[in-house]
Image (cartoon, rainbow, N blue to C red):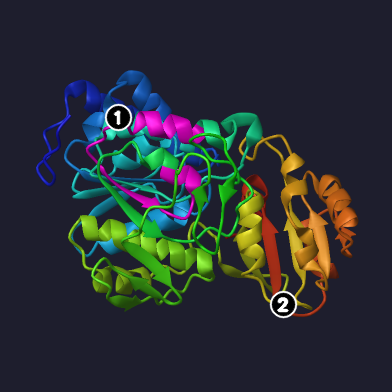
């Protein structure tokens, strides 16, 4: 389906009915206190018109963003950058499966750009429906193993699904799984965004051989599969563009991972004609993303809310928090949206929290307690957030939680 950005064709009566019914279902869900309603609204709309996602996207210049970690933040940064060139519709709250995406686009009839976060499992299908102009691929690591299968299989699905795509693929040259997935695409822009978590990329995705990793480089000694030369790179606090110019990154979001997200976002914005300087200046507006990085006041204490859903995410988050003796609350659930398998806790180096006073909450606090015991760090198990905050010694509290635990905390603190 070829789009005509800025010049939408009128929706068919069936599509209009589907959009209206979806909005009504979402409104009922909100009124019942069951969240934003975007998922149920999208499901109802797609039931009435299974092709609705494609119809809603046809007038947009679309960019898709997928990864294990960082996709919600990167989607938000890209959306902010592209607003320099025109109105943007985006699923900014992270409802990233087809129903949630459809719901978001239903509100974007006057937009020029669609910036869409996509769950890893659904990337190929959403790309087929929306005919994107650009696709950003950030990283792949183990996550929700009970649902998403292992990373090599996911990379293979991406590789097949993106084979021959007309989209410009903006891909992380430092992640071998991403390079393997993107290499079937004819038009790839490689970004040196870094990769701190390497435990899912020790074997070659092309042949199964052992990867060699001298410094920042990587290659397979058996089949020759290797890191491509990047045209964009994160260098300290600057983005290096393809011409070798260095542009300063000024973000309100913390950490190296977010500088990497900004670098990829600048490369995406350039595909749409937004220069790096303009794109990066606009990204400074982003203070928090769906509650992440927010500092909230609760029981006369400051809590910084941090989301970490899998081993790679926890590793990045440990590098963000204030050093000891800053108090830390950890919360882990294992509900459907988290993945019910908590074996990933053993892949996280909780020894890095040594010296912090640690309080543990959440549905699976005892699983986490066993892991911390083995790691040799001191902790206290608490029944509730209120109890954990009351026990925490003075100072800003760093609160790290996985997905549904994070939502529980946000509801409790009124965020």
Crowd class of label 1 (few under 14; some 14 to 19; many from 20; radius 10 Å): some
Q: Residue 176 in the image: state x and y as whole percent.
A: 49, 47
Q: CA distance from mark 2 to mark 1?
A: 46 Å
Left or right, residue 148 beside residue 11 = right
Q: Is residue 14 magenta?
A: no
- Write down the quadrant of residue 388 in the picture: bottom right
Which residue occupies 77% across, 67% down? 353
Which of the 4 image quarters holds residue 100? top left
Q: Give the residues drawn in magenta, as a range.
A: 154-179
Label 2: which residue? 323
Q: Is residue 197 above or below residue 390?
A: above
In the displayed structure, does residue 295 sit left or right of residue 63?
right
Residue under label 1: 128
Callout 2 crowding tier (Cα within 10 Å): few <14, some 14–19, many ≥20: few
Decide: is 150 above or below 351. above
Name the residue: 18% across, 23% down: 13
Mark 1 lies on a secondary structure that is: helix
**Between 289 and 40, which is closer to the camera in this rendering?**
289
Q: Residue at x 52, y 34 (%)?
A: 207
Residue 265 in view (yes/no)? yes
Mark 2 or mark 1, earlier in chain: 1
Residue 171 magenta: yes
Residue 127 lies, in percent from the top left, at: 32, 34
In contact (CB < 8 Å): disc 2 and disc 1: no
Residue 376 horizontal/vertical position (percent): 89, 61
| Residue 202 coordinates in the image, percent (x, y) | 60, 46
Does the image show residue 24?
A: no
- Element at label 2: loop
């Amino acid at each position: 389906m070829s789009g005509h950005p800025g010049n939408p064709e009128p929706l068919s009566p069936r599509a209009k009915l589907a959009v209206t019914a979806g909005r009504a279902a979402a409104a009922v869900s909100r009124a019942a206190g069951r969240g934003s309603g975007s998922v149920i609204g999208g499901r109802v709309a797609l039931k009435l018109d299974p092709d609705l996602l494609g119809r809603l996207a046809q007038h947009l210049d679309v960019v898709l963003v997928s990864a294990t970690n960082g996709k919600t933040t990167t989607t938000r940064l890209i959306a902010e950058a592209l607003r320099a060139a025109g109105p943007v519709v985006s699923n900014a709250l992270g409802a990233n499966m087809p129903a949630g995406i459809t719901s978001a686009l239903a509100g974007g009839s006057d937009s020029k750009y669609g910036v869409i976060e996509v769950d890893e499992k659904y990337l190929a299908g959403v790309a087929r429906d929306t005919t994107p102009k650009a696709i950003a691929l950030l990283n792949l690591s183990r996550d929700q193993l009970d649902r998403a299968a292992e990373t090599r299989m996911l990379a293979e699905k991406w590789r097949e699904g993106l084979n021959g795509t007309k989209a410009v693929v903006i891909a992380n040259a430092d992640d071998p799984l991403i390079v393997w997935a993107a290499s079937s695409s004819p038009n790839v822009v490689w970004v040196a965004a870094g990769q701190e978590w390497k435990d899912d990329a020790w074997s070659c995705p092309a042949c199964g051989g052992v990867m060699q990793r001298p410094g920042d480089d990587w290659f397979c000694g058996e089949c020759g599969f290797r890191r491509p030369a990047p045209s964009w790179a994160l260098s300290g606090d600057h983005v290096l563009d393809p011409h070798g110019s260095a542009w300063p990154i000024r973000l309100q979001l913390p950490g190296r991972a977010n500088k990497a997200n900004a670098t990829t976002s600048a490369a995406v914005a350039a595909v749409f004609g937004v220069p790096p300087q303009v794109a990066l200046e606009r990204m400074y507006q982003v203070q928090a993303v769906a509650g992440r990085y927010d500092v909230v006041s609760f029981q006369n204490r400051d809590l910084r809310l941090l989301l970490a859903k899998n081993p790679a995410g926890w590793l990045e988050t440990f590098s963000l928090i204030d050093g000891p003796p800053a108090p830390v609350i950890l919360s882990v659930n294992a509900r459907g949206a988290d993945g019910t398998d908590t074996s990933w806790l053993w892949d996280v180096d909780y020894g890095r929290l040594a010296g912090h006073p640690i309080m543990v909450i959440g549905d699976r606090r005892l699983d986490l307690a066993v892991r911390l015991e083995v790691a040799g760090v001191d902790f206290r198990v608490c029944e509730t957030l209120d109890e954990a905050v009351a026990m925490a010694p003075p100072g800003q509290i760093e609160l790290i939680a996985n997905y549904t635990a994070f939502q529980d905390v946000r509801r409790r603190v009124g965020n």
